[in-house]
Image (spheres, rainbow, N blue to C red):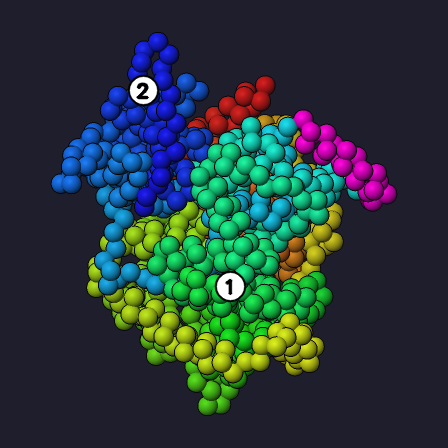
Amino acid sequence: MGFPSFAVRIIAEGQGLTMAYFGRFYLDQEKDLIVTLDLEDGVMRYVLETPNHTTGNLITNLAKICGLPISLSETGMRIIEGTVPCYIDAYNREVYIFRLGNTKTASIYADGTIERKASIPAISKTLMSQTKNYNIDFEKTVVKTYIPAACKFRSDLHTHMNANLHPDLLIALGIHHQILYPLYYIKKLELKLNERQKRQLEQERERKKEEYRDLPLSGKYMDRKIDDNVYLNFADLILNNTENASYNIPRIRRSLAVMKDGQAVFTNLEKVYLYRYVFCRPVLSKEKIALNHVELIPDEDIVRALKQMEEDRRNPSYKNFTLFQDKLLWTARSYRKCGITYAEISDTSLVKKSAAPHVLKQIHEAMPAITEETGVTLRFLAALRRIPVGIGPEGTEDLHMQENLQVLKAVSGDPYVAGSDIVGEEINDIRELSSVIEAIVKIAADNPSFVIRIHAGENDSLKENVLNSILLVKESLEENQPFPRMRIGHGLYTPNLSSAKGKQLLKLIRENHVVLEFQITSNVRLNNLSALGNHPLKQYLSNGILCVQGTDGGALYGTNSIDEELSLGKLLDLSEEELLSMRKTEEEIIRVSMEEFNDKLSSMDHRNVEAYYAERIDHTKEEFLPAKSHKALLSSDLVLEEKMKKMPEKQIPLIIAGGSFNNDSHETRMKEEWTDLLDEILEKGDPEKMFFVVGHAMKAYEKYILDHNDKGFEVYAIVPALISEKEKEKIQDSEVFVRVSIIASAMGLYKSFYYEIFKRRPSVLLALDGNSAGMNLVQEAKNGKKKCRIFVNGKSRMLAQKARTLEGYAKLLKGDGSDGKDILSAVDEILQEGK
């Protein structure tokens, strides 16, 4: 990869020495690992810094594995600095060779060209950033950027519409199309404004305050309402404020990808999508400014993109492109850079009655020219959110899903609609969506090329979701209907593949030619995979299972198709033969998909795509969701009102995870060493200093606290928004106070622990047992804005595995009798710090 030099030569006063900023390159996709080069009288010096990572873990661990010393910058940040040796190559050219360890990382030429030869995958960067003792081999951290040509993947078969574009491209599109940027995000990101921009926003805020004065809102809710509806032209924010651009742009960039210092959880992903929606579903400014002096923006990639966007406006094929169509264009250009020729992108707008016709119109208008330029074909999976059917308090039918399925039926024959997807955080049993899958299979019966993809097996909470997804499709087939083209997104967690149920799964996958899609970077960055040795891809390949790679929206996770393949190969030790097997699978998918695409395209009437689909949707009246009796769920706010109480502010919450955070097949078996620990805490703890917080299930160790609470500690249970009659009775009969979550699913409750505790107050977490939800709870405790002292059962395999990636932030308990003292001391320390 070549980077032009933006060298600025400066003559050192009184010394006659020529000094220069020579150039800059990055060791990762997200511009987090920055190498800045200076040249002075033929000597090249470098500074490696990580300004987006505030803990210092990333650069400290990198220095350690590379055997390099750490220095401090003038601002007190940790940096690595040194010289880059110069060589003469076979063509008598000067070339500077930058190495990390013994690995050539970049070749730097006198004309300013910088060719990166190795990089640091987002996975390694993430794991380095969240521990004080990184222990993955150097060879799997600094990775040579070469892929055997025969094995190079050409598709991205698992990605998402608003997650494809790198933050720099979104920033450039926001400037070019002059979107409106909310005051709320300006405040949230602590962006710097000039005095004129401050006055403009203050005046507009006063007008909105007056406009909203009669709304039934007050305090922070009114402030949020106002700030969400006061805007600044994004182009104005950047171009008319260049003195602050070098400060603002990195902050905006950080908001458009998952968190930097460690693994994220789905809570963080949802927040990132909100920041991205400002750019991907924008409101455009009516008052435009002149897009002058873009070269003053202190980022060459943004400048380059903006200049190309201006050039595109002189291209008859692109001059009238909407922002959505420009997104398609730049997505295809990004794929072309990575050697990708075919991609299928999940998009929820294609199942919305109000959006689908217009979206398809724009796709049909734009894609021929885009494909002609780039050679990339983009197709789409109409994505339904995995909301369980009939979760309302009265067990009502999900009318929203009914509409989604009707729209899906109407658009399913479009050439650009390759199939459907079921997306969203995997916190519900896929069998709750049986009627939805039945409807999708019915739609596929009329479209032999239709792909049915289901996100399943992404975390270990519901290990039978992959098996049940395939069984549900099979059971939904009409008489003589062939099994449809089916893909499973992730497939990371299943029953043990060597067990009877695992062998049944493998047989079912093989017989029905189901394809599994793997996205290792998103698995790691979203806290679904911490130990790479647990990844099942090699086992699937050895059993003859069809597997392909996706990126899951690589721009969110600091990766792209090339880095993803490098990560798969290096970090999972895949052989060329295994990579070639995956390449052959994707080749067949591309071949069949393109044949069907071209057949559909040639037979379609393109005269008025939007009107055509609007009419089809209006005339699609089929009732897809059969009337079924759903188990009625109750509103916790209503049925537990008398148990609700605000947590005390001056005492320390001690969270006990030991029964409520398990997967569907795991039952906690209590051990004497841990009940002894709880006895010690109950006996020696002070109810005036601390209180307990547990999950809503109140099983095992959590129940033990309730059963042995002789000193009268207050105990709070965080419960889902919707509960069953049985759960209601159990909570009502227990000596607990209640905090009601906005989350309906029990497996998503870890989010409420973050919002209720880790975001707002210091705390102590004692994690004794749990699976994926427990791992998310531990990670949320580490990620929280307020410090949490984390103690983890060292004999719980999953939790201990998670804790080891958080060395320096989580303590593994040994059960040797000293743990209780440490936990109670943590409570006292927090109280002292509060004073």
Mark 2 falls on what kind of element? strand
At a point 44% along the width and 66% down the height, the residue shown is 372
At 19% from the left and 36% from the top, the residue drawn is: 93
Q: How many marks?
A: 2
Q: Secondary structure at mark 1?
A: strand
In the visual, does 315 lie left or right of 714? left
Which amino acid type is shown beneath numbered disc 2? Thr
Query: How far across and down, in percent of the image, does residue 108 sit?
Result: 27, 36
Between residue 747 and residue 66, name the one nearer to us. 66
788 is within the stretch colored magenta: no
Which quadrant: the C terminus?
Answer: top right
Mark 1 or 2 closer to N-term?
2
The residue at which mark 2 appears reads as: 18
**Whether label 1 touches label 2, CB < 8 Å:** no
Counting from the top left corner in percent of width and height, residue 45 is at 29, 25
**Circle 2 Cα neighbour tier, 10 Å, few/some/many (<14 / 14–19 / ≥20):** some
Q: Which mark is residue 346?
A: 1
Left or right of residue 609: residue 296: left
Which residue is more in the foreground, 327 or 30?
A: 327
Q: State the separation of the CA atoms marked 1 and 2.
A: 53 Å
**Residue 75 x, y percent position in the rendering:** 44, 20
Magenta stretch: give its range: 195-216
- Coordinates of residue 345 in the picture (x, y in percent): 48, 63
